[in-house]
Amino acid sequence: MSTVWEAVRRAHTARDLDRPAEARRILGAALAVTPDDPLLLAELADIDYRLNDYAAALRGAQAAIAADPDRVDAYLTAALVHHRNNEQDEALRLARTAVRIAPHSVSALLTLAQIIAGRSNTDELRAEARAALRSACAYAPQNADVLAHAAESYRKLPDLAEARRHVERGLAENPLHVELLETRARLEFGDFSTRDKAVATLRGLLGASPNHAPARRLLAEIMWRALLRLAVWVWFFAVAVVTLSMWVGPGVLRVATPLLFIVVLVAWVRVFRALRRQLPPRYLRTRLLRRPEALLGLCALVFASLFADLGAVMLRTSLVGAGYALLIVGVFGASMAHLLLFAAWLRRYHGETDRDAAEDYALFSVIAVVCFGFGVLGVLGALRWWSREPAAFPVVAALLGMVVVTLLLELLLVFALGPRNWGRPVTYCATLLTLLALAVLGTRWSFLRMAAETFTGAS
């Protein structure tokens, strides 16, 4: 038994020095001598999980449980593997078993809460997670690591007030705790009023821990989201101008469209000023110069905005059809720019990738456009025959359809890069392709209606 404990001690030392491969070698050598030892099996399963060898981690955890049915750490490793594979029921069963075996185990309570948090859960499950977090923090009220885990789970539940409270409690114990600083930055980033604070927190965190990958990814996410907003503003301008043209005449458009264009220019200037203030020196330039597609996207965006503005000018003349055509070209250019910038975001940089955040951005953007944009489209469709220019309605529908097609293509691009935690990859891909086909058909219908109504009847 002393040989087993010595191997575990050496493996822990290697793990703490960020040498998990060496820890696995030490444990593997010890298991060759005592192949059924539950402690060695559980420790090796934990190391395999850290090395992202999830199949081996699950096999090792199951072997440890078979050798010792009360091996709490083995249950937790198996639960985390099932959780990563989106097998929620089995993950919950294993985590609850661990809590039942060791009801005062802080690790078991935190793991149970982690598995519940961030999923589409019932009120009962969220209450169970909060109870587990309260118990864990009660058992270790001054442990910054425990408070960091609790804060992150509260953030994902979501219970932002409790997350902030636990972050501040943890930082009072350890002001330089990197996980607590990361969670604080994410909380600040989630609130538009405190995004500048989020960047300051991240820069402080990276100053103390330059290789902290999650903080680096969050800083990159802030940059790419800001650049993508440039294209969103062109979309907004085009849709707003076409919608106005349904209800007001050239006299009002002569005043309204320059004001809208000024709003877009001011928004662009604010984006670049904010990035210059927020990002480290040369951060933006370095990343753009190493991604030609991003530079091409920004150039396309400039031309797209000019086409959209020229289209708005044409709407104030007798060449209304030409104005709509130029606005469509502007939105198409902005969509291509958005797609290029999104592809640049997905590019690996120094071995790091930010796929998860990019996918979340595209998914929430699709939901926002479908829920809000098509809600507005429904109102315009119901009232179109009372408008001044009913023929503008298909143009609005086409513009929104192009935006939805762009965002769905970006989701497919994320999927094409390889599976992440896909529980049902075939179902996910089939759903995306079906939605894309519907969006393409809807956009095609809009263009056909434009050919029949707008470009033949616009005056």
Image (cartoon, grey):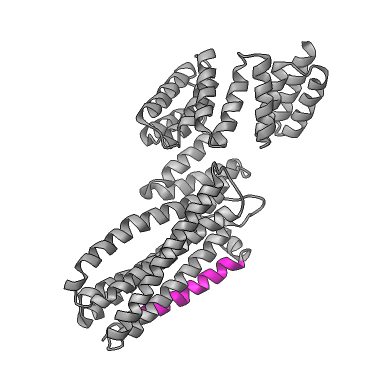
User: Is residue 140 at all visible to an observer of this figure?
Assistant: yes
Quick one: which residue is furthest to the top in this view? 1
Q: Relative to 240, is 51 on the left or the right?
A: right
Q: Where's the C terminus, which quadrant? A: bottom left
Please state the horizontal and vertical placement of residue 244, each as a whole percent of the image: 25, 73
Q: Relative to 180, is 367 on the left or the right?
A: left
User: Is residue 235 at all visible to an observer of this figure?
Assistant: no
Please state the horizontal and vertical placement of residue 115, each as a whole percent of the image: 50, 30
**Residue 53 versus residue 441 in the image, above or below:** above
Please state the horizontal and vertical placement of residue 154, each as a whole percent of the image: 42, 32
Depth order, front residue of 126/427: 427
Q: Which secondary structure type mostly characterizes the magenta part of the structure?
A: helix
Residue 84, magenta (yes or no)? no
Measuring 30% from the left and 80% from the top, which residue is drawn there? 454
Please state the horizontal and vertical placement of residue 456, each as a whole percent of the image: 31, 85
Measuring 40% from the left and 22% from the top, which residue is drawn there? 131
Q: Where's the N terminus, which quadrant? A: top right
Number of marks in the image?
0
Q: Which residues are magenta?
A: 292-309
